Image (cartoon, helix red, strand yellow):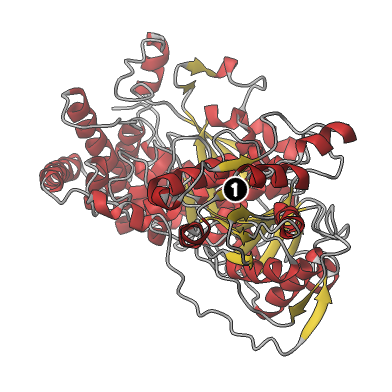
Amino acid sequence: MVSETIKRNGYSKNLNKEQIWDIYKSMKTQRLLEERLLKMYKGGQLSGAVYPGIGQEASMAGIGAGMGENDIFGGTHRDLGVQIKRGVSLNEIALNFFGKKHGPSKGRDGNSHFGVVDKGTLMVVSPLPDSAPVAVGWALASQQNGSDVVAVANCGEGATATGTWHESINMAGVHNLPVVFTVQNNQFAYSSPNEVEFGTPNVADRGTGYGIESKIIDGNNIYQVIDTMHEACEKARNGNGPSLIELVTFRHYGHAGHDPAEYVEEEVREFWIKRDPILRFESSLIEEGLFTENDFKVLTEELEKEIKNTIDWAKDQDDPNPEEEIDDIFAKRTTPIFENDESSKETMNFIEAITNGLNEVMEKDEDVFIMGEDIGVFEGAFKATKGLYEKFGSARVLDTPISEGGFMGAGVGAALAGKKPIIELQFYDFVYPALDQITTEAAKYYWKAGKPVPLVVRGPTGAGTRSGPFHSISPESLLAHHPGIKVVAPSNPYDAKGLLIASIYDANPVMYLEHKKLYRKPDLKMEVPLGLYEVEIGKGKIVKPGSNVTLVAWSGMVSTALEAAEQLENENISVEVIDLRTIFPLDEEIILKSIEKTSNLVILQEDVPFSSIASEISSVVAEKGFWSLDNPILKVTSPNTHIPFAPVLEDSFIPSVEKVIKAIKELQ
């Protein structure tokens, strides 16, 4: 037995015998389950990987036990103990390890990479700690709703070196969110010891820099973990802000099943093995006279039998059906389409239509809020949020730190919690720091965890404003490449408002692209209906009928296409111009039907040519409309370079009317 004893003092002192036994049972279940899984992995009976948390059971069970019943937990691959304590069943765990159809991730991810949101655990992904900003977003939604839900964001000490963690904890501190950050410091980030991971003596030392109360505790003392967690959760629940808790613990095995952990010195291992959290807990339970050695023995036998039977059962359950993969990429919308007789209209330019749409939808739906840099009092870099801060307040027009990854992940968490967040990127070039959260979390949540993420990411795109290579990107091909994301790109005020409303009420992440040259284009004003209406996502539009050539464009290139078509009319060349409006899902039908009529296709895009939307359209037409073509498909694009600054270079970079006319004439 262990010489050290642990005592109940605070919140844990009031736990009754049944509650104490449940906590012990969850720890023992984790230990026995992971020992069996590790043995199976080493014996070649499990695919994927095993990340044993053996030795850290007190940290995990204590985190789970200290949380409120409705609180949410965002964890990592070594947190099976928290999942168990939060009510995730052995059946669910076993099904996921075997990649079965009815497991939490439906066979789309394995081992401990899962969450059961309905039981209060967020989806686990490989990049760590990606669930931290998602937990922050759930806490933000809780703060807005006054729901009293506290979010817990957990990781190991190695993950605290990432920008994701720092952005999350900074944002939580700035907005005083009801979130608790826990760090299970198990001494090694894979094989790297603490001294090469951070320059401060302790992880918790960092909390001071973010204005967050921090504590260092013995992560192998179950009572101390429970008490500290409960205190931090109640502090957050009462509006007193986030906390950072460093739980000092030790993993008995390596990072994963294939890691022998030879980098751990024997004296270090011996020190921690003597402080085994389960043995310490058992000693205290015997000392208190609550349970006996025989009680532990009987439970062990029962759990070993249950675990074996569960694993044997899971092996024979249904495998996933490959034919269902694509069907589960997008969630289906369940709310009705907005109807509008369009009897009341007002003349608007492009950005006025966007602002009008944001204003009207926020008036109608309190779950809609906007988040981004300088969008409040300053009203955004291009003034798209003009008047909204004054009207709706700081809770719904939320200024964020310069933290694209942090607030993008927060948008995901808020969407999961029932909100309809709209994220404004100051420029779409700044999407790169946020791509991890977009592609790892937002795009995969419905496919992997069955939970829709209704999230709109909007902001300015495109060249032509002398903004240089870091403020002028056309990101549609970058974004559309990732399954689970919709991409829209309106070209006029009517479509801008209608597509924005449709995007907000779509059940999926929508990337909404606003070409900044269109914002206040003098000749681009239209009668825009007042009140909510929608332009269907996934449907293009013929904006000029024609018979000789099909010209496909979108966003800022539509006006160029129309000007070229009008000039060619004088030469008796009839050009049919299609405005795609939506990049993904792509309206293949409108393109294929048009080339059946014209037999020629030119694609006009501002983005670079290689691996682009123009390339994809060419591929679709070559595969499905080849016999309708009389000539090769031509693409008019920018050169395959970055976007230059000097006017003479930028003007040459952007596809011109003259280049479009030249291409079309080549087909005659």
Residue 319 lies, in percent from the top left, at: 18, 48
Tag 1: Cα neighbours inside 10 Å, few (<14), some, or many (≥20)?
Answer: many
Count of numbered marks: 1
Would you name the residue on which mark 1 appears? 602
Q: Quadrant of residue 500?
A: bottom right
Residue 525 lies, in percent from the top left, at: 82, 69
Q: Quadrant of residue 220?
A: top left
Q: Amino acid at mark 1?
A: Val
Residue at 89% over, 62% down: 522
Asked if residue 652 lies left or right of residue 181, the reply is right
Q: Nearer the viewer, residue 648 or 295?
A: 648
Q: Nearer the viewer, residue 437 or 73?
A: 437
Q: Secondary structure at mark 1?
A: strand
Residue at 59% over, 55% down: 549
Residue 241 vertical placement versus 393 (above, below) = above
Residue 50 vertical placement versus 177 (above, below) = above
